[in-house]
Image (cartoon, rainbow, N blue to C red):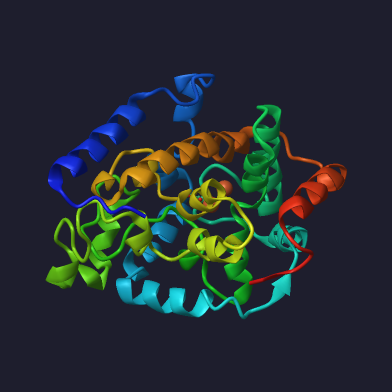
Amino acid sequence: MRIVNNLSEAAKVSEAWEEFLKTKYGANKSSKQTAAFRDYEVAMEEQPTVAKFYKENHEKQTLQHVLEKKANYTKLDKTRMGIWEAMEKLNELVDESDPDTSLSQIAHLLQSAEAARRDGQPRWMILTCLIHDLGKYLFFLGEPQWTVVGDTFPVGCQYSDEIVYPNYFAGNPDIHNIKLTTKYGIYSPNCGLDNVHMSFGHDEYLYHVCKPYLPTQALFIIRYHSFYSCHTNGAYDWLMNNEDVEHMKWVKTFNQYDLYSKADEEPNVEELKPFYQELIAEYFPDAIAW
Ligand SMILES: O[C@H]1[C@H](O)[C@@H](O)[C@H](O)[C@@H](O)[C@H]1O
Ligand SMILES: [Fe+2]
Ligand SMILES: [Fe+2]
C-alpha cells in the first residue's frame, strides 16, 4: 500500500474527498426523510439511553483499551460457528446506541441486504449488507455495549467535533496525555486508515473474522461503516490515503442500505433464509473462527 507523505499529495487527497462528499448520494431520498435519521438532539430528549450509551463509550474508549481488545479479539480463538448461526444469535440483541431501530439485529441485517438486493447491487454487496453488524457477537462474548456498538472514531489524536456528543470526551483520561491530543497525535498526515487505531467495536472485530473470505471493498466497508464523522461529515480526511478515499465511496453506497432500510417493514426470516444461505455459501465455509 502506498503511503502519501508529502503535503501537496496530502492536499490532493483531501480535495478529492471533499469533492466526493459534495456529490449527491441517496438522491432518491427526500431531505425530509434523511433528516429523520440519526437525529441525536431529538434522541437526547426522547431516548435518554442513547446519550447515556455515548457518554460511557466516549469516556472509556482509551488508546490502551483499544490495544488490549484488539490483541485479544484478533486471536479469533473464541469459538467456531457459521454466518447464519451468528445471525440467529443476534436475534436477542437490541442496539442501545441506535436511535432509529428497536428491532432485533437479525431484522436489521435482512432489511439492509434486501434494500441492496432491490437496488440490483452485486452479490458481494448484498452479502456485505447481510453480515456487516455480525461483529456485535462481541456482546455474547461478554463485552458491554459501549465497546460493541455505536459510531467509531480514531483514538490517539484529537477528537473531532463531528463525532456525536463530542462533549462527552471530556471524561476520557486520554485527554490528559498531551501526545494523544494534538491534531495528528500518534499519526502522520495521510498515513492511511490501516495504520489508525479506531475505537474498538463490532466493525474491527468482524473485519478480522472475515479477512480470509471477502474481497477488499467488502472488508473495508465492514471495518469503517460506523466511522460516520469521516464518511458522512468529512472529518479526519487527513488520516486517509488515496486508496482509502476510493474505498470510502463504497462505504457511502453501503450506508444508504444500512441506514435508510431501518424504516422498512420487518422481514420474514424463514422466508428469506434459503436465498441468503446460498449467498453465504458462495463465500464462506460452514464454520469460521470467531
Ligand atoms: O448505533 C449505530 C449502530 O451501532 C451501528 O451498528 C453502527 O454501525 C452505527 O455507526 C451506529 O450509529
Ligand atoms: Fe454497525
Ligand atoms: Fe447496521
Q: Residue at x 53, y 65 (%)?
A: 205
Looking at the image, residue 235 lies above or below residue 69: above
Q: Residue at x 47, y 22 (%)?
A: 32
Q: How many numbered discs sit on the rendered protein?
A: 0
x, y percentage for residue 75? Answer: 54, 78
Q: Nearer the viewer, residue 232 or 60?
A: 232
Residue 63 in view here: yes
Residue 55 in view here: no
Looking at the image, residue 35 lies above or below residue 46: above
x, y percentage for residue 186? Answer: 21, 66
x, y percentage for residue 59? Answer: 32, 67
Looking at the image, residue 112 lies above or below residue 211: above
Classify residue 45 as left or right of residue 30.
left
Q: Nearer the viewer, residue 209 or 100?
A: 209
Classify residue 249 as left or right of residue 257.
left
Classify residue 15 as left or right of residue 115.
left
Q: Which residue is drawn at 40% across and 45% down?
A: 228
The image quadrant of residue 54 is bottom left
Quadrant showing the C terminus: bottom right
The image quadrant of residue 181 is bottom left
Quadrant showing the N terminus: bottom left
Looking at the image, residue 233 lies above or below residue 28: below
x, y percentage for residue 110? Answer: 71, 44
